[in-house]
Amino acid sequence: YYSKPMLLIMLVTWVIKKSNVAAGPRLDNHQLYKFSYRTEVLLDRAGGSKTSSAGYRITSDVSAHLVWRDPGNKDDQLIQLAMSDVGVESLAPRSKRDLLKGSTAESLMGKGPLGALTRPYMIHLRNGKVKAFYSYREEPATIKNLKRGLASLLQVQLNTGKVIENDVSGRCTVQYRATNGQVTRTKLLETCQTSETGFTTHSQVLGVSKKASSVTSFTLSDGFIESAEAEEVHILTANSRRSAGVKVVSRQSLKFVGRAAGPLEVPGKDVASVVASVDAKLAAVGVMAEQVKSQCKGCPTLVEHWQANKDQFEPERLSKAMAPRSFLAFIQSIRKATEKEILSVLKSASKTALPQVVDAVTSAQTPASLDAILSFLNFTDAKGLVLQERFLYACGFASHPNEKMLQSLLVGTSIGSSEIKESVVIIMGALVNKLCLKGGCDSPTVVQVKKMILEGPESTEVEAEIQMFLLSLKNSLLPEAIPIFTKYAESEVGAFCTIALSALQRYDTKLITEEVKSMVNRIYHQNRRIYEKNVRSAAADVILSSNPSYEHVKNLLLSIGNLPHEMNKYMVSKIQDILRFELPASKVVRHAMKDMVSHNYDRFAKVGSSSAYSGFMAKTADVSSTYSLDILYSGSGIMRRSNMNIYGASSGATLHGLQVAIEAQGLETLIAATPDEGEQDLESYAGMSALLFDVQLRPVTFFKGYSDLMSKIFSMSGEPVNVVKGLILLTDHSEVIQLQSGVKASAEFQGGLAIDISGGMEISLWYRESKTSVNNRGALVVTGNVTVDMDFVRTGMEVSFETEASLDFITTVQFSNYPFLVCIQMDKTTFPFSEYLTKYESLPSGKSSVSSKGRKQLVPGSEFPLHQENSNMCKKVFDSDW
């Protein structure tokens, strides 16, 4: 049985076959049709002008004649095409820099490839569509693709409609519009299916945006092509900065010149027998483009590349933009190398540069690089913690991980370090999240790891292991983990509560059910038992970020005034920050505050040092970056929790770029103070937890237990503890753009970050002062590179930008008197910002041309504004210091 649409198509096809109405261009017997043909490709900045473009044009004469026609269908034709008088010229003549000036097609291509290009070939055209493409298998793929480009240009239908066609671009949906001798063909490039595969960064904020169009205009006379003009445009831009974009423009032009007497039709029953009788070497090789393997002549090997650039990987260079730029180039070299070559570099690297080499090898994400790093690292050796953790973090930040990478982490009991075992499980959660986003949630390894981490918290009674599994689930963002977080949020262990609540805050609000909201409200209002302040404040954060109801907000407001002293102040500051910064809950909060019982002077005049503040770090047309600082103190003046967040937003997507949380508890005995409610029996502890680019990292402990605390106080040097340090591949986009002309463009966008995040805590009993610090140092480079390599000429363009910056967050508390003095500082130093544009061309002979231009500027440093109370407090702190 056939569907109605299928029956209709069959009926129309039968009518066309039996009538004299042409379905596509028809060639007459004994006629030779002559055309002039031109195809060109240009590379330019997105939004750039022709004067800054790079590219070339191929011109030729084209002859076509009918070889065979089906006697029962005039639109079923076998046509022979031949190119002649081929020329190649530059589209951006630059006097001395024009590499193609004075060259002939033969001197550029070589006699063999030019002979292949001018050798006749055939296309089977039925109803205006290319059904088969006949050429010689031994011809170079680039030559056959150029021929396919010309054949695809002849594909046209004479009536309006949408169809699926095969051409050099792949299998694409095409929209035809026909009016009065004019036909417009619009190819919907996003629908094209090809054998070429690429990859891209999962984060939209750090990713690449694409726009593409392909329009061909035909002018016809009596159903025959008088001219065909095609233009195809691809624009790729880095979402983080739209000016870092590249445009690829491909044009084709075919114009009818005239006709002359030509060969007679060849008799035969069908296309295959006719082709064989004309030339037995002709083969049906398909109209879709062949893959072209680009061979880099004269390019350095991986070892040579390493020897020339190894100094850039030393730790003291990581704060400079040259470090991530070298990192990106090194990754490209690693992706072309064998396992043996990669191992050779790993073994030859210095002890200080080796961690950065591990970052690069892992970030390359090729089978060879993964095999090399796994054979190099020895997970049974507890002394190799630094290299092992760098490998794990690079896996967590991987742009396009595969199942094999996740499988490699299932090393079980063969891990020598408990810290590495913890990091392995935590990073597994991040990989599960990324693989699920790619549609791989049901792959065997992902299913195995999901089962392990979902059952993990209940499989052990060791607190450290339960925390490890909860952090892994936090990274995974599995919907199945929400009931687990709901359970552990009400645990008697404060660390479990805060991890579970912070994890719930990361989920889409649509997944936060009424049951979860009820649980969170129970914690905040202490309906069943007493909770620590930092747990209750975390619960408040979940309530206010999960599309709260009017009643939930009203009850929260009514609680202010009945909370512990510093928590009262924190909640007042949190509500004010939501209103001032117009956060999502601001509308319902403003509505609830119309009730004078919940909003009055008595509640909102609470004093204290705790605070919550949000602001803009940067705001541009491309991306906005915001920060938030939440600090909660105990009633005795010692910091209980400090939470700094940095977010990036672009085109409706959000990225949690950084979160550094410092927690301290059980320190009241140092100053003979009374602990707050619910915190009397807490063990002395201070530690830091970091989340970087949506990946939760292993927490760092400053001290744990009273004896450890006292030893750290008397041995405290003030030196910060490193949380994460290394090179991270942020943006990673690779694709092959198959143009309708038969030319291929290779696009690579990469972003690399050299980062050093450290934090510390100092306590002076003599001066009765504590100081916590979070120091962030980084250098960022983003490059976008598009190359067109036709074997005989290579043209490319690279756009890039780079910067070096530092951000310090310091909190000073003086608790010699009450109320104690608290000063929060968040400083950004003056930093450089540079943009570059580079164009390059090269020939197989070794001749090359490179031109670059750039723009540099200094962005003034600043101290980010916080609330006025903080400014007043800082004046008192520094006056007292003076």
Image: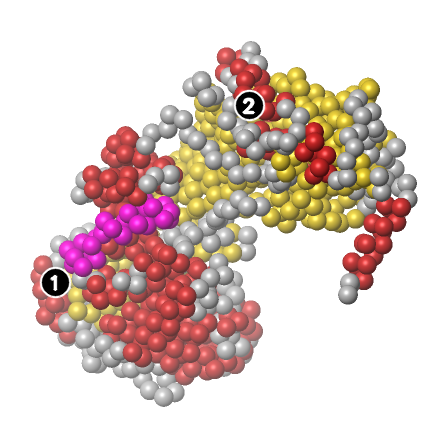
Considering every residue shown, the one lying at the far right of the view is: 19
In this orientation, which residue lies closer to the viewer: 284 or 89? Answer: 284
* Residue wearing tag 1: 713
Q: Element under label 1?
A: helix
Using the numbered discs, state the Cα–Cα distance from disc 2 to disc 1 in whole angstroms.
Answer: 76 Å
Query: Residue at image x 34%, y 39%?
Result: 337
For the residue marked with disc 2, what is the amino acid?
Answer: Pro
Give the extent of the magenta segment.
Answer: 359-387
Q: Is residue 638 left or right of residue 200?
A: left
Q: Confirm whether residue 599 shows in the render.
A: no
Query: Residue at image x 66%, y 26%?
Result: 120
Q: How is the image coloured?
A: secondary structure
**Residue 816 rendering spot, x and y as whole percentages:** 18, 66
| Mark 2 or 1: the one toward you | 2
For the residue marked with disc 1, what is the amino acid?
Answer: Ile
- Local packing at callout 1 (Cα closer than 10 Å; few below 14, some 14-19, many 20+) is some
In this orientation, which residue lies closer to the viewer: 166 or 850? Answer: 166
CB atoms at circles 2 and 1 under 8 Å apart? no
**Residue 374 rendering spot, x and y as whole percentages:** 27, 52
Q: Confirm whether residue 84 shows in the render.
A: yes
Query: In the rendered image of this protein, does residue 241 appear above or below residue 811?
Result: above
Q: Element under label 2?
A: helix
User: Was residue 378 drawn as part of the magenta stretch in this picture?
Assistant: yes
Instruction: Using the image, tell me which numbered label, if any, was put on residue 113.
Output: 2
User: Was residue 374 drawn as part of the magenta stretch in this picture?
Assistant: yes
Query: In the rendered image of this protein, does residue 539 appear above or below residue 190?
Result: below
Q: What is the quadrant of the N terminus in the image?
A: bottom right
Query: In the rendered image of this protein, does residue 331 appear above or below residue 257?
Result: below
In this orientation, which residue lies closer to the viewer: 247 or 24? Answer: 24
**Residue 558 rendering spot, x and y as whole percentages:** 45, 81
